[in-house]
Image (spheres, rainbow, N blue to C red):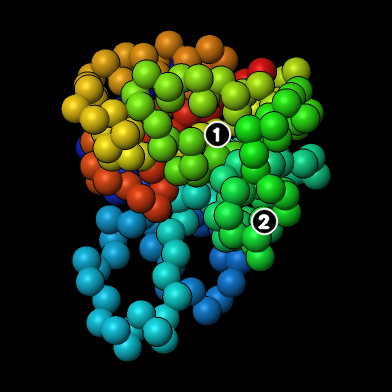
Amino acid sequence: MIERYGSHLDYCAQPEYQRWRRQWEPPCTDTQWVDSEQEWPREFPPRQQVQERHGTRLAYHLVATLGIGDRRCVDIGCGHNPHPGLWGVDPHNERHRDELWTPEWYVHNWGRWPHAFSCNAIHFCDQSVIAHNIAKVRGVLRPGGTAVIAINRARIEEWSHGRYDPERLLTDLGRTPGMTRMVWSDEPRDAWMDGNVWIWLRQ
């Protein structure tokens, strides 16, 4: 149920990911695609930043693991919502979201969705609160519904103000109700793009 990898690249070397990558079709052709943010140069020259778009495949892989098919999926904290077909909710990014994400949104959407996805959106909290935020994502699922959540431990550490304990976090997340799988990557420690903990849930 809990898989621990040294890095994103170690995960991407696994047969499951490699099989998915061979059949994946990029959503746009004007982007320089890499598997993980670990493969990006640390600094892009200014002209390169203007002329090139860059993206990682990992978030698309995570969505694919849900097997959405023709069922609906909500992207909680969608940002610029790059995933076609997902219903994006976000407190900002009005041009890219489908709906405003507020605390009341959970009340109106409780038990409604066949699938949910959230990437680096619910981790802006103290370590003691992350389990509650994960439970809210699971709460919007219909019976039998599935979700995958990506979180970045660096944001939890920042918001925990000296009370962060990574081994306790690993233990606590391993007890998440409804969890069917968890992947923990030791590196990158600050995975701002795709997260370094991925949790699959079933309602």
Please give left or right for residue 174 compared with residue 148 in the image: left
Residue 49 seen anywhere in this rendered image of the structure: yes
Q: Is residue 115 visible?
A: no
Q: Residues within 10 Å of mark 1 (few under 14, many from 20)?
A: many
The foreground one among 182 and 189 is 189
Name the residue located 57 percent from the left edge and 45 percent from the top edge. 77
Q: Nearer the viewer, residue 3 or 203?
A: 203
Residue at horizontal 41%, vertical 86%?
Answer: 51
Up-down relation of residue 43 to residue 19 (above or below): below
User: What residue would you read off at disc 2?
Assistant: 97
Q: CA distance from mark 2 to mark 1?
A: 19 Å
- What residue would you read off at disc 1? 148
Q: Which image quarter holds the C terminus?
A: top right
Residue at 37%, 18% in the rendered image = 128
- Which residue type carries mark 2? Arg
* Residue 40 located left or right of residue 80: left
Image quadrant for the N terminus? top left
Of residues 11 and 149, the one drawn nearer to the viewer in this rendering: 149
Q: Residue furthest left?
A: 162
Please state the horizontal and vertical placement of residue 72, each as a whole percent of the image.
77, 41
Percent of width and height locating residue 16: 46, 40
Q: Position of residue 52 (x, y in %)?
A: 42, 81
Secondary structure of the residue carrying numbered label 2: loop
Along the horizontal axis of the image, is 69 left or right of 11?
Answer: right
SS at circle 1: strand
Name which residue lies at 45% across and 43% down. Answer: 120
Q: As shown in the figure, which amino acid type bears the numbered disc 1?
A: Val
Q: Quadrant of residue 54?
A: bottom left
